[in-house]
């Protein structure tokens, strides 16, 4: 057993469901055994109750739950920063040429390692990962995630039209390749499978039928929706019988409690009602939406409909893997929306980067906060002495204020330690 002494902060409550301050909890120590949190309280109380147990002191900064990224593309880790393009041009010029390279399994292996090490360095310990179009590349990702102990849900990306020819698969091969991957990887340790049509723009009704058949195996589902106005118009033209974009998925039974849709920047009210009815979640990707000029996410309308919203970095369109940056950009977007925006507090930002994602992925019984019984997945954010964040933390009035300053100023260089199910991950901090 180990006692971790730190300023421990998490959101066991839901700041969207009441007074945001009530969602936040703070303690001085955690007791961890076999990777699981067994006690929580003051350092003095835990030492009294467990005399002789070693104490690991994490002095300075904050200890928060490992971040949960609900939308991130592993094949795009090498193409971040393609600025100046709207979605469909960015895909054509930046993302898809790189994704084609993952046909080479050795290339995919290198990319998977860079991607997963990048997640850990950014403090992300759980993620719903948009996969590759190539099954061997998925074996590389899952194998590398297993070796690192990460909580990864991912799947083969399925498309049978409109994309580059080398990224297409037929509904038949999609079915057999996905079924094989599910057998190999779903529910193996911390790994799970997600059926992943790229978006209905590039997936025919036959392909979406295959997705429904695969979803019936008890796995997860993810795709894109309502990201960009040109994309939405194209989808409407491809599915003349559909009521709206979400209906292209819904009429195949793909809107469920195990479904996570990325973006939803331009939803209609009927789509929001249908998402809520199906119990599906939305991955909000603020820096990607900003970089591609996709639009300002209507968080208030999602909250009013009771839809679970979490954060996605959407790398490579997003501006890096560090979830606090996404939380800050989410805050900016809501500010820019003026009266239509949802005013986010520091408790909301921590929740969005941690527990909201765990809930969206159905993992909140295991991760997302530091409740006793959950896995010890944690990030220690401790700024370098003399940095502007260190100065600001010294002048913070209380923990909520310290959180606000952390979300405003922290970068991956402030990740001083990451624990994955109780094991300290090898993170090369930028200043070590
Ligand atoms: Zn995406």
Image (tube, helix red, strand yellow):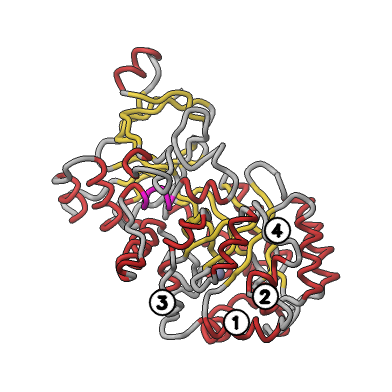
The residue that mark 3 highlights is 291
Is label 4 in a helix, a strand or a loop? helix
Cα gap from disc 3 to disc 1, whole angstroms: 19 Å
Question: Of residues 322 and 290, which is closer to you in this image?
Answer: 290
The region drawn magenta spans: 348-353
The residue that mark 2 highlights is 243
Considering only order in the chain, which callout, 2 or 4, is on the residue closer to the N terminus? 4
Q: Position of residue 206 (x, y in %)?
A: 81, 73
Q: Residues within 10 Å of mark 4 (few under 14, many from 20)?
A: many
Is residue 118 in sight in this rendering?
no
Cα gap from disc 2 to disc 1, whole angstroms: 33 Å
Asked whether 412 falls inside the magenta stretch, the response is no
- Contact flag, marks 4 and 2 (Cβ < 8 Å): no
Q: Position of residue 405 (x, y in %)?
A: 24, 52
Considering only order in the chain, which callout, 2 or 3, is on the residue closer to the N terminus? 2
Is label 2 in a helix, a strand or a loop? loop
Q: Is residue 85 above or below residue 378?
A: below
Q: Position of residue 67 (x, y in %)?
A: 45, 49
Residue 139 marker:
4
Q: Main secondary structure of the magenta part?
A: helix
- Contact flag, marks 4 and 3 (Cβ < 8 Å): no
Considering only order in the chain, which callout, 3 or 4, is on the residue closer to the N terminus? 4
The residue that mark 1 highlights is 97
Mark 2 or mark 1, which is nearer to you?
2
């Amino acid at each position: 057993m180990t006692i971790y002494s730190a300023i421990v902060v998490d959101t066991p409550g839901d700041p969207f469901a009441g007074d945001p301050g009530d969602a936040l909890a703070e303690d001085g120590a955690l007791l961890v055994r076999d990777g699981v949190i067994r006690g929580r309280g003051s350092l003095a109380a835990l030492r009294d109750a467990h005399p002789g147990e070693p104490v690991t002191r994490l002095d300075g900064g904050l200890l928060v739950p490992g971040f949960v990224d609900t939308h991130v593309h592993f094949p795009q880790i090498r193409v971040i920063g393609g600025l100046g393009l709207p979605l469909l041009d960015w895909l054509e010029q930046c993302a898809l040429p790189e994704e084609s390279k993952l046909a080479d399994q050795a290339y995919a292996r290198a990319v998977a390692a860079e991607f997963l090490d990048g997640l850990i360095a950014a403090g992300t310990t759980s993620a719903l990962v948009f996969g590759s179009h190539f099954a061997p590349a998925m074996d590389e990702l899952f194998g590398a995630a297993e070796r690192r102990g990460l909580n990864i849900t991912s799947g083969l990306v399925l498309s049978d039209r409109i994309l580059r020819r080398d990224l297409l698969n037929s509904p038949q091969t999609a079915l057999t390749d996905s079924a094989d991957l599910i057998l190999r990887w779903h529910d193996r340790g911390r790994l799970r499978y997600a059926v992943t049509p790229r978006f209905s723009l590039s997936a025919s009704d036959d392909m979406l039928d295959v997705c429904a058949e695969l979803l019936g195996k008890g796995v997860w589902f993810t795709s894109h929706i309502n990201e960009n106005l040109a994309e939405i118009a194209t989808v409407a033209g491809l599915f003349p019988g559909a009521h709206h974009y979400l209906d292209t998925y819904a009429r195949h039974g793909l809107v469920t409690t195990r479904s996570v849709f990325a973006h939803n920047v331009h939803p209609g009210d009927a789509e929001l009602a249908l998402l809520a009815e199906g119990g599906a979640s939305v991955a909000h990707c603020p820096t990607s939406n900003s970089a591609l000029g996709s639009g300002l996410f209507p968080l208030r309308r999602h909250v009013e409909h009771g839809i679970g919203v979490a954060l996605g970095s959407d790398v490579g369109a997003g501006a890096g893997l560090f979830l606090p940056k996404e939380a800050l950009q989410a805050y900016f977007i809501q500010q820019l929306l003026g009266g239509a925006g949802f005013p986010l507090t520091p408790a909301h930002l921590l929740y969005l980067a941690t527990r909201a994602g765990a809930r969206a992925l159905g993992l909140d019984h295991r991760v997302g906060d530091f409740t006793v019984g959950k896995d010890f997945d944690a990030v220690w954010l401790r700024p370098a002495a003399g940095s502007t964040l260190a100065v600001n933390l010294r002048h913070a009035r209380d923990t909520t204020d310290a959180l606000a300053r952390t979300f405003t100023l922290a970068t991956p260089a402030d990740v001083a330690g990451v624990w994955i199910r109780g094991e300290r991950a090898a993170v090369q901090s930028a200043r070590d």
